[in-house]
Image (cartoon, rainbow, N blue to C red):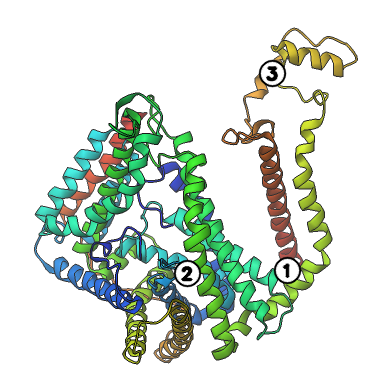
Amino acid sequence: MSEQSFIAGGHRHGGHFAERLVHGLQQALEHSLDAEAISRQRGLLQGLDPRCKLLALLSLMISGILASQLVTLLLLFGLAVLLALLSQVSLRRLYRQAWLSVLLFSGVIAVPALFLVPGEVLFRLPLLHWGISLQGLRSAAFLLGRAETSASFALLLMLTTPWMHVLKAMRSLGVPVLLVALLGMTHRYIFVLLQTASQMFEARRSRMLAPPSGRLARQVVAASSGVLLGKAFQLSSEVHLAMVSRGYRGDIYLLHSFHTRRRDWCALLPALCVPLLILWKHA
Amino acid sequence: MHIPDGYLSPATCALAYAVALPFWLVAYRHAKRLLHTRMVPLFALFSAFSFVIMMFNLPLPGGTSGHAVGMGIISIVLGPWASIIAISVALLIQALFFGDGGITSFGANSLNMAIVGSLVAWACYQLLAAGAPLQSRRRVLAAAVSGYLAINTAALLAAIEFGLQPLLFHDAAGTPLYAPYPLSVAVPAMMLGHLSFAGLAELLITGGLVAYLQRAYPELLSLQAGRSDVAGAAVRSTRKLWYGLAALMILSPLGLLAAGTAWGEWGVEDFANAASRQQMALASGQVAPPAAAPEGLARLASLWSAPFPDYAPAFVHSANFGYVLSAVFGAGLILLALLLLSRLAGKQGLAE
């Protein structure tokens, strides 16, 4: 992935395409393992019921999108930092996985807005004489502020909740069971296919004496994708047979073992009030 | 291409979810009817495949690299409805677990890439590969073109979503609250990268994959091949009508050459405008119009305001282009309505 993502902080742009893929796989696996490890630690967010946590963090993300004052965005960003500190998530991790990635992606998009958005010119660049407008500055701050705040809340959700709990929470909140099952299985098979792909590339690389030409590299990627597609199709048939042989008839059942306590409601209610407050202030 | 959170307003995000929802429902019903218990494992594996090939950085001519989305190949192998679900699920995992693409903008990302991308890829492939044997070179070319068109259509849609933000959502001082660039900047900036690198990556991977499947897994290509013959025959039988419709759309700016106003198609503001009053009098055999707009007209005029007033959307500066855009939009709406009606009629026919 060459776009803004939680694993883009350690993205590797140089090297052979197979090396980059193996590196991408490692990053995805590391992110998954880190998330599991952090979600087992004792912290504020880890101690909350996943359903309340999912709703509360989604509510805070929506608040970030609704906010039309930079101060509100700053307060929400501060809240994300505070929640991270209280949940044993280091700021270094937030910086590496969310803030830096957003800055590199959205920053590049936001900078031209300083000059392109028309409005009251604050100052001009010394040599180029390009005017930086107040409106441009504010719009760039909005773009970056919203992206950073949302990414922080999304990362906090992922780091403090095991993936299976996120799925179960989604199911409890009314997401169709089929989608929940699909997300669970897809997540599992992403790692299977990533591992298969990296092994294929590794095997190919170990048989090459020199770096491949561009044409050959494209042929290798296309052929590997084709093999992977064939494997995916074959694997889906095998998995289907395995499911049917174990009694799967199209109905999916999930076990729920969540219990809400007073502190879950204490976290959820204020979080739900934030977007309502913003809306009320605008109305 | 993956729109992060914060780039689109809540209203745009909600609208994108609302537009995407019927497509997801139809896709789900199609898949459930055809696949039943096979659906979950098949879609899970293809979603995972879509995710994985988004991580393949394809070396491109010129020393750069780009990654494909896979909307073309999944549409070609499994059809557009399966592709809609598979790519949507891949996008949701990317958004939730890997932070690639926003959670609030997931509806817009799905609409652009999973829904529109898949449908464009499928339609283009069916059109170009209609009647071609499984092993023919035309299928490779059709796949490559469909991948290229699909990713560029998705990018154009994303650019339009970005470009509409500063027009619709800004504060009192004119500060854009979300994506800050107007259509005149967003569309070229987005399309430049997609018409070149990203489009090329999708073109190469879709074409290359189909060429590989022809040699190694022809049975995967045959899953949807039967449909292309039926679609091809349908397209061939109505081809002349489509050409005629396209010609009419292109010729629509001729309307600008017509002098004066159409009799009876006056707005409330025309009654207050001296030049318009003169034209109204000319069109009415020199009978002077009333001094003010009739009360009923004034009362009802505010009930509905057209999205493209006078066939000229506010964001388009060229009148001719505005006319063609309006023609395309209007024809598209009519075709959609006819398609829905024919589906409803078809269902009733089956029930009988």
Gap between marks 1 and 3, in whole Å? 49 Å
**Farthest right residue?**
B285
Please name the residue shown 69% across and 71% down the image. B128
| Disc on the earlier residue, 1 or 3 | 3
Residue B309, above or below A179: above
| Disc on the earlier residue, 2 or 1 | 2
CB atoms of marks 2 and 3 within 8 Å:
no
Tell me residue A176's x, y (percent): 42, 65
Is B72 situated left or right of A62 in this image? right
CB atoms of marks 1 and 3 within 8 Å:
no
**Mark number displayed over residue B351:** 1
Please name the residue shown 46% across and 64% down the image. B88
Please tell me if label 1 and label 3 are on a single chain: yes
Residue A84, above or below A206: above
Q: Which residue is mark 3?
A: B268
Name the kind of residue labelled 1 in the image.
Ala
Q: Quadrant of the N terminus of chain B?
A: bottom left
Q: Quadrant of the C terminus of chain B?
A: bottom right
**Mark number displayed over residue B151:** none
Question: Disc 3 is attached to a residue of which chain?
Answer: B
Tell me residue A105's x, y (percent): 32, 53
